[in-house]
Amino acid sequence: MSPAATPDPFSSDFVGAERRAVLTELLDIYEDVVAAGSTAVVSLEAPRGWGKTRLVHEFYATLAARPGQSYWPLRLLEADARGSRTRHVVYPSRAMPPDGAVLPWMWWGISCHLRPDGQPAQVLADAITQVEAHGAPLLEAAAARGTIRRAGSALGLALLGIAVPVVGTASAGVDAATALWQTIRASVTANRQRIAADIDPDAAERLDLVDRSLAVAAAARAADVPLVLIVDDAHRADRSLVNLIRRLVEADEGSVLIVSTAWPDELARGGEGSFGAFLRERQQAQAVFRRPLDRLPRDDLSRLVLSEAPATDVQVVAALAARADGNPLVLRGLLETRRAQRQTRDGRIELSADEVARLPNSYRGQLEERWRDLEEPVREAFAIAALQGREFLDDLVRVATDALGWGDDPAAVIADVADRLSWIGRLERFYVFQELYLVELAQQEVREILAEDEVQAVLLQMGRSIQESLDHARLAWIHLPPRLAGKLMELDVRLALEAPGLRPRAFESALQLSMILASRGADEDAELWIQSAVEFAASSEDRTRAAGIRAVLLSRLGRNEEALEVLMAEREALEDGTTDAALIDKQIAEALLEQGDLEQAEGVARRTLLAEDPWAQQALTEVFIRRGDFEGAAAHQRSILERLGADDMPSTVGNAHFKMADLLHQLGREEDALHHARIAAEILEERFGDSGHETLRARELAGIALMGLNRAQEAREVLSAVVAGYAETGDRWRLSRLAAQSELARAILKTGDPEAAKSLFVELLQAWRDATDPAHANVALTQELINRCEALMTHRVEVRDWIVAGVRGGDAADVLADARDLVSTSRTQPLDEQLHDLSLLSGVLWHAGRAEEAVEVSQHCAAVARGHKSDRRRQRELERLEAWLAGGRSGLEMPDSEDVGGAVRGALLVVASRRESSPILEMAILDAVRLAVREDAGLAADGLAAAAVTGVILAGERLLHGYPSFA
């Protein structure tokens, strides 16, 4: 009988004193976590079928049935829970809160599984979608605490993957929560297709999903709602999920209870990055509890039998319990065999003890028996499906059975079985065999029902159907969902390996699949697929393409010598002057540059000039760059652009303009760089789309050029759009996104908002540390920029002193960026501060030899002063400053001592009217000293005399210390 405190959500009792004790402990740990606002992990460990997930179901039901609170629904599984239906079910199929429901806690259930290749599937993207059902009550709970903005921002990041601005929201109230949730949900609905495309079980580690999952916890924390995270089959957890668990435990913020189920043997075998490794690392920690489960005693197993068939003879009950050997899943399998079902009448199992002894007592044996008991059309449909692997499309099964002339609709058969059995699951448009052993059984079946020529015919028919779908998508430029496209390509290649007739057309799939995997960082898997492409290549052009891509992958894997050997071997088979030869030469030259062999690289690069292929000829541009000859590189790149025409691929033209823009930026020719970057972005957008990596890189470069032109606000807008574009790509271009965010933070700094810039830099600092080696240059640079923001926010006087010291030392050009930053951040300062910083910038520009810009700044300074006509003295002073710079302009452009001297006198007069020291005065004294060095002692004396009027002659004396002859 069930304990009184535990309502029975199933048709069978929750049995076992040990199981009840573990449930009680789980509830106690939950209470401790809630009371302390801390994080804990409970790992339930036992072999397959020993009742780990059932324990999770009881935990859920007990929490949901507590008085004074309610959750929805009251049970994880509302349907008949007999047999194996509870397996892998850790989240309710219908989680719909009733109107006005108060959220007592939040349940987040994640079930781990393996991909067809045996590697852990990435599950976080799919799991995050569960949070949507909790959005409204979460925000209502946060509104009651006055934390709705924090909760709304975190919830938006979790569901959309991008920051959602939460502005103008009342601090409390259901209406505010409802309005904010409607806004977030509308964004989720509008982005539903992008969110669905992000669910990719084949993806490598996704740090962006970890960040979004942490935002789920942050939203619950802001609402003061405890979070219960269930991780079923955690021994199969992918790196992203393990990373999330680690981060939650290390942060130890909010009330978070993580309950996992796992197989002990698999935990012990788990290597680096696995959940088993995490448990071993944390096994001494107080927040981690490992709870192994024992076999169920025979008395408890007997109780389970009697709950199903209470009139069964005691000896039969005992025989069934003994046959199960402590495993409740095996006992369920015994009761569900066709023999046991046929012999059960009126609540009595009419089997003899000998008949029980002949029943299969292993999970695999029971699967085999149940397979044999299936109707013939079902076995045939599964057999055809298994030719595709563990995941299969029912449409392809229909194609195959139509080719064989079978009458039954296999899709309907499979759908029916999926509803009746727990053998088949659904993942987007694919069905999945839940157990790998079922795939083996089905594949054995296909060889029994089909001859080899029929198997080949079926493979060819399915393969051609796939290739037609892929060809249609390419020709019509229809974008298939990424996962579907990838799976179709994978199927295309796998079927081609079995059916040689498919290989010529499967080449493109192997090639594309390799590049998709490489873009996800799975270089080793990509290299395996590219080998298939090499094997499938039907022409020399195909072989060259495959060899080139394989060499890139080998280089990324650190196998540089092998990559060069692949390229050299391919080059020997090609004639000089052909496009293929030039493309391979380009890669060889780049490989030699990586090895530092500049001379040989240049020789190979010049061979590319024999072919009319602008893309290949850019190898010589790279040689110029490596030599440090940017002018030569720009000249060669310009010649390439001049030869490009309408027949060249848009990607080639766009990338050539991008390279030109980058070179011009390196040369400081920002206006020209901006021109080419914009051309590149426009062309690349047509080819790769608005969020294509190449498009975003070109736009980012345009933003950087705008900063170089001091058009910071425009740069900020451009770079904000670039960062948003990268956010839509998920974690695919993580480092590129971080680099763009860094440039955006610089632009924000230049627009006069050091506080916002610092906030973004602080986020970036942690992101760089997570994504790269902590000693990475980006970490140090970002910290330096944070320090600059702080200086601009709180230590403006010290920054000015630094700038003046730079000018004194003859390093005006080096401190020019600091002077610009000072001006950009003075807009929130009093008017005196603004004018002071503008006058300082004009002086720095003058000493940096940028006279025209100095005049422009002074004119702007005067315009600012005119906007405040109440202070006539300041206006007159600024007008004199403007006159000084305008009058000295010709002298600055053509250093004539009288004009320069006039400028010095004008500056001194302006400063003298203030009767105080200033950076401009000290620069004027410096110029007087320089005039003295040029043997114009009279003008120098006038300058120093004027300086004496202001009472800062000591500053001049300090400067003169370096010129003893004049002193």
Image: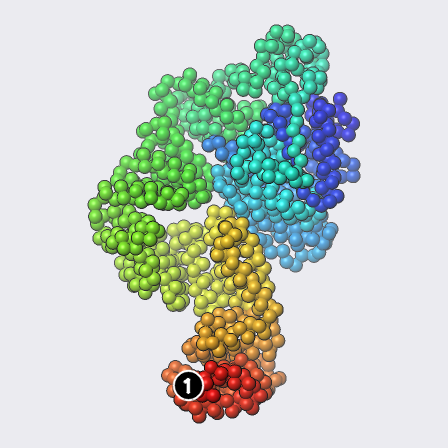
Type of amino acid at the residue the image marks with label 1: Val
**Residue 471 in view here:** no
Locate residue 332, reporting x and y percent.
Answer: 63, 19
Count of labels shown? Answer: 1
On screen, residue 221 above or below 431:
below
- The secondary structure type at the circle numbered 1 is helix
Residue 708: quarter of image:
bottom left
On screen, residue 447 above or below 220:
above
Between 342 and 765, the residue placed more toward the observer is 765
Locate residue 808, reporting x and y percent.
Answer: 48, 78
Answer left or right for 33 relative to 508.
right
Locate residue 447, reporting x and y percent.
Answer: 41, 19
Answer left or right for 595 relative to 749.
left
Residue 347: quarter of image:
top right
Residue beneath disc 1: 933
Locate residue 694, reporting x and y percent.
Answer: 41, 53
Residue shown at 32%/34% (left/top)? 535
On screen, residue 890 above or below 684:
below
Quarter of the image with the N terminus is: top right
Q: Residues within 10 Å of mark 1 (few under 14, many from 20)?
A: some
